[in-house]
Amino acid sequence: MGDRSENADYIYGKKRLREIDRRVRYLRKRLEEMIVVSDPPDDVSKIYFGATVTLEDDEENSVRYRLVGPDEINPQLGYISIDAPLGRALLGKTVDSEIEIESPIGRKRYCVLAIDYSGSSD
């Protein structure tokens, strides 16, 4: 049977504990750097963090996205990161602005139809 240090479950458990400890340290550090944004920006005519934007592509298909931090992304809800290529391209734009990004399926162009800071993209 051997002692505990030779037990595969014990070794795996220690490795898993180190991974959990590393993740906890990472999250604590991130938490210290977080800034809660509860108010809309001074200029709501431009796209900033927290904005819900309505875009139209070249085929006149309309989509809505909310710009969130990298820890909040949720494609099913339309939450995209401000660090994503589309998010970066949208920052600072206004209604009727056109943007162009490189996507996995090629270049995509969008026109900004609306900007909303009411809080939800539902």
Image: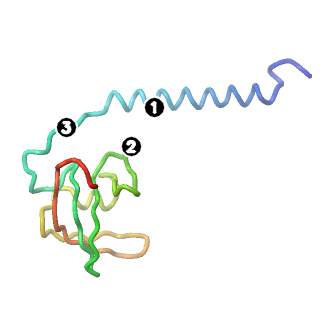
Residue sitting nearer the eye, 97 or 56: 56
The quarter of the image holding the N terminus is: top right
Point out residue 77 in the picture as x, y percentages from the top left corner: 36, 55
Image quadrant in which you'd find residue 56 = bottom left
Q: Give the residue type at disc 3.
A: Ser
The residue located at (18%, 71%) in the rendering is 98
Rounded to the nearest angstrom, the CA distance separating label 1 from label 3 is 24 Å
* Labels 2 and 3: the sequence-earlier one: 3
Q: Give the residue type at disc 2.
A: Asp
Front: mark 1 or 3: 3
* Residue bearing mark 2: 71
The quarter of the image holding the C terminus is: bottom left
* Label 1: few (<14), some (14–19) or many (≥20) C-alpha neighbours in 10 Å: few
* Residue bearing mark 3: 38
Rounded to the nearest angstrom, the CA distance separating label 2 from label 3 is 17 Å
Rounded to the nearest angstrom, the CA distance separating label 1 from label 2 is 12 Å
Q: Is residue 2 left or right of residue 114?
A: right
Front: mark 2 or 3: 3
Circle number at residue 26: 1
